[in-house]
Structure formats: structure tokens, C-alpha cells
Amino acid sequence: MPESSNRVAPELRVGHLYPDQLNMYGDRGNIITLRQRCVWRGIALRHTPIDLGEELRPDEFDLLFIGGGQDKEQDEVARDLREVKGAALRAAVDSDMPVLGVCGGYQLLAKFYRPAEGPELEGIGILDAWTIHKGKAVARCIGNVALQWGEQTLVGFENHGGRTYLGAGAQPLGRVLAGHGNNSEDHQEGCVYRNTFGTYLHGSLLPKNPHFADHLISLALRRRYGQGAESYMRPLDDSREWQAHDAMLRRLGVAPRRHAAVG
Ligand code: GLN
């Protein structure tokens, strides 16, 4: 990390995939959180929407986000991933760019999503997982969720009809402490591959999970600026964020953990 006085302020270039089609439950709040946590640290955040039909140029970004949506919007996005952005998104993932996919976006980062009605939607197969909707007569997975994530917890809100199943070698994001998770059966939630994180946690996810937001920012900065980038990640006063996090845990009957900053 350059110590000279002419040290250039770091920046984080965030690509927001399909913001008009996939933005359920204020998933846009994840971008707002990333921006604010960067601004508080003097890191410039450049946010670029990447819409249907637009080319994805991975070398122009440090982090990508794709939110959740209804089956209809997912159909449009699946086609665009297949015809326009899929190869570039796979290249970004294989270059260890951090990618966060929530709910419908998560489902399309995997192998396929079989909706209650209509044709199966092909995903881009980054995640070794697949999703099957059990039909409109089967209750959706709706409610607040708490996960064990390493030594920490994650909280959020889920609303999905699809049930996601992980392949033999796939890693879940976390273990369900309260709520449904991927499929209400195996107590797993989400899926992780390299620096790609798929999850059902809306909320939006990042405001109540500052440690996870910082994990994504750190991954992106280290990838771009090297290990010295840690010097940009000074600890923030997250007392309000943890109050909201722990209040959700208590509401779900889960004992709050000790909070340590996660780089
Ligand atoms: N349409 C998908 C499902 O119902 C995803 C929903 C969402 O993104 N919240 O499973």
C-alpha cells in the first residue's frame, strides 16, 4: 500500500445486474449499504446499473450484485444471461470477483429454476445447485431467517416458492438457525463458490449484517489493490447495525453471538 502523501483514494466499482427486473424487498438497499460503508472509509464507490441487453465487461468492475424477482422477470433475465451476459459473468466469477446473488438472482446463478408454471429457466451454472418450485398449492418459504455463518450469524427475510438443493460438492452459505433456508429440509441456506455468494436473504441483507458487507468490500479491495487494501478497512461504529441484528435474533429465539469485525 503506497504510504506517500500522494496516495490515490481507492475506489470500488459495483455492477448492479438487472436493477429494474430484480429488485424485490428493497434489494437495492445492499448497494446503498456498500456505498455508505465505503464512503465512511474514504473509499469511492462507483455504481453502474447493467440492464437487459447490455454487455457485461468484467474488467470494469470489482463487485457484482444481482437481486431477487418474480418468475416473470426471471424469465427475461435467464434469456439475457444465456444470450448476452452469461460468459462474461462466469469469467468474472472465475477471476474471484465477489458476486452477491439474492433469491431469484441466486437461483439463476445455479443450474436451473423450475417454476410452478411454464418452462424451466436455465441458469448459468456457476453454483452447483438447482431450484424446483413445489407448485402454487404448497406454501411459500416466507419469514425472518437466522443463519450460522462461520463463527457469526446472518439475519434476513425470505420469500420464495422455489426450493434449492445443493450438489454433493457445493458449500452452503450457512446453517439455518431459524426459518426455511434453501428448502425447509436440509437446514442449509445459500450456496458459495469461490467469491460468489448466493442467498435467499432479502431485507435487504447487508444493513443488518455489517460484517458480511465488509467481507464483500474486503474481498473486492484485496482483489484489486492486494493484501495492503486491508488498511482501507478501518472499523466502523456498527452499534446500531448490531442492535438491529441482535433484535432479529432475539425475535427468532436465537442467542446473539459476540461480534468481531470480519475483514
Ligand atoms: N420467483 C422465485 C421464487 O418464488 C424467486 C423469488 C424471489 O426472488 N423473492 O422462488
Image (spheres, grey):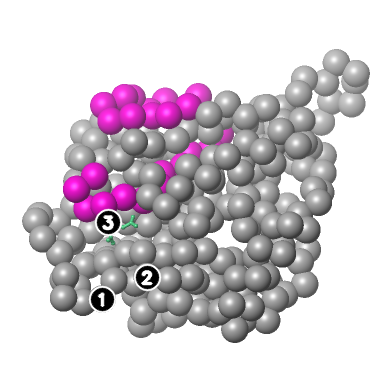
Q: Distance between the Cα atoms at labels 1 and 3?
A: 23 Å
The stretch of residues the image draws in magenta is 48-73
Residue bearing the label numbered 2: 142
Q: Residue at x 24, y 36 (%)?
A: 80
Q: Position of residue 134 (x, y in %)?
A: 19, 73
Q: Position of residue 113 (x, y in %)?
A: 23, 58
- Looking at the rendering, the quadrant in which ligand 1 lies is bottom left
Secondary structure at badge 2 equals strand
Residue bearing the label numbered 1: 139
From the viewer's side, name the closer residue of 92 and 214: 214
Q: Which comes before the other along the chain, label 1 or label 3?
A: 3
**Residue 141 on the magenta segment:** no
10 Å crowding of disc 1: few (<14), some (14-19), many (20+)? few
Q: Nearer the viewer, mark 2 or mark 3?
A: 2
Amino acid at dot 3: Lys
Q: Which mark is residue 174?
A: none
Q: Is disc 1's CB within 8 Å of ligand 1?
A: no
10 Å crowding of disc 2: few (<14), some (14-19), many (20+)? some
Residue bearing the label numbered 3: 111
Q: Position of residue 138 (x, y in %)?
A: 21, 77
Amino acid at dot 2: Ile
Q: Is disc 3's CB within 8 Å of ligand 1?
A: no
Q: Distance between the Cα atoms at labels 2 and 3?
A: 23 Å
Secondary structure at badge 1 equals loop
User: Residue 212 is drawn in which quadrant?
Assistant: bottom right
Amino acid at dot 1: Ala
Q: Residue furthest top?
A: 6
**Residue 70 on the magenta segment:** yes
Secondary structure at badge 3 equals loop
Q: Residue at x 39, y 81 (%)?
A: 186
User: Residue 41 is drawn in which quadrant?
Assistant: top right
